[in-house]
Amino acid sequence: MKIKTIPNPELLKQIKSIIPDAVEVIIPFWGDDTSFDIGSDYDSIEAFDEHDDDIDLDDEEINYNITEKSRGYIHKLLSESKFFFNMRLFMSGYVSFDLKKKIATTCLSDDMNDIDYMKRELKSQGRSDEEVDKILKSFPKDYFTEGGEDMIESFSMSDK
């Protein structure tokens, strides 16, 4: 399978310099266009070593630095994704950085294409039935599923 390339070897080096033993770093994201957050909550970023053991990131400065260095790239991945991102609506998921393979993988959580969840979310925002229908019809025809499923897409970070 061919994956899209959105190079950022500098970010790979920066992450590796902050967490030298890491081979994978996972950064969550959530929000909408009024408040979008990327991994900045204390203790929300995960990192794993070559033995798949959890690396203790019990340090606010590490979490902050990883978040700040990756924020722009994560926004770019989401905007370039084949998945339909409507930032007027709440979304959540994570980006996994595979530092060995130089691949970033976005995963939008299964709630995001669960038709029932999306209807409830839109109604909880005080939207009318007509508004909910209009928004749902703006998505591609096969976007929603009953119960939802993770939407995963990988990007090469290498510039070669």
Image (cartoon, rainbow, N blue to C red):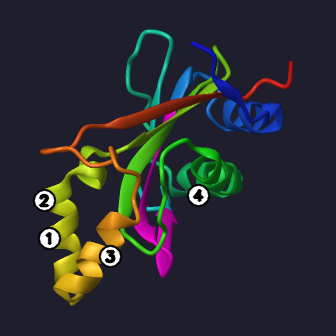
> How far apart are the alpha carbons under marks 2 and 1?
6 Å
Count up the numbered dots.
4
Q: Earlier in the sequence, mark 4 or mark 2?
A: 4
Percent across and percent down for residue 76 are 68, 51
**For mark 1, what is the residue?**
120
Q: Which amino acid type is marked by label 1? A: Arg
Q: Earlier in the sequence, mark 3 or mark 2?
A: 2
| Residue plotted at (67% across, 38% down) | 18
Percent across and percent down for residue 108 are 39, 45
Q: Secondary structure at mark 2?
A: helix
CB-based contact (under 8 Å), mark 3 and mark 4 = no
Mark 3 nearby-residue class (10 Å; few <14, some 14–19, many ≥20): few
Q: Which amino acid type is marked by label 4? A: Tyr
CB-based contact (under 8 Å), mark 4 and mark 1 = no
CB-based contact (under 8 Å), mark 2 and mark 1 = yes
**For mark 2, what is the residue?**
116
Q: Secondary structure at mark 1?
A: helix
Compared to residue 77, the image places residue 122 above or below, namely: below
Please indicate whether residue 2 sits to the left or right of residue 140 in the image: right
Where on the picture, by quarter, is residue 124? Answer: bottom left
Q: Earlier in the sequence, mark 3 or mark 1?
A: 1
Q: Earlier in the sequence, mark 4 or mark 1?
A: 4
Q: Is any atom of residue 97 visible in this view?
A: yes
| Residue plotted at (59% across, 21% down) | 21
Mark 4 nearby-residue class (10 Å; few <14, some 14–19, many ≥20): some
Percent across and percent down for residue 68 are 66, 58
**For mark 3, what is the residue?**
134
The span shown in magenta is: 25-37
Q: Is residue 62 magenta?
A: no
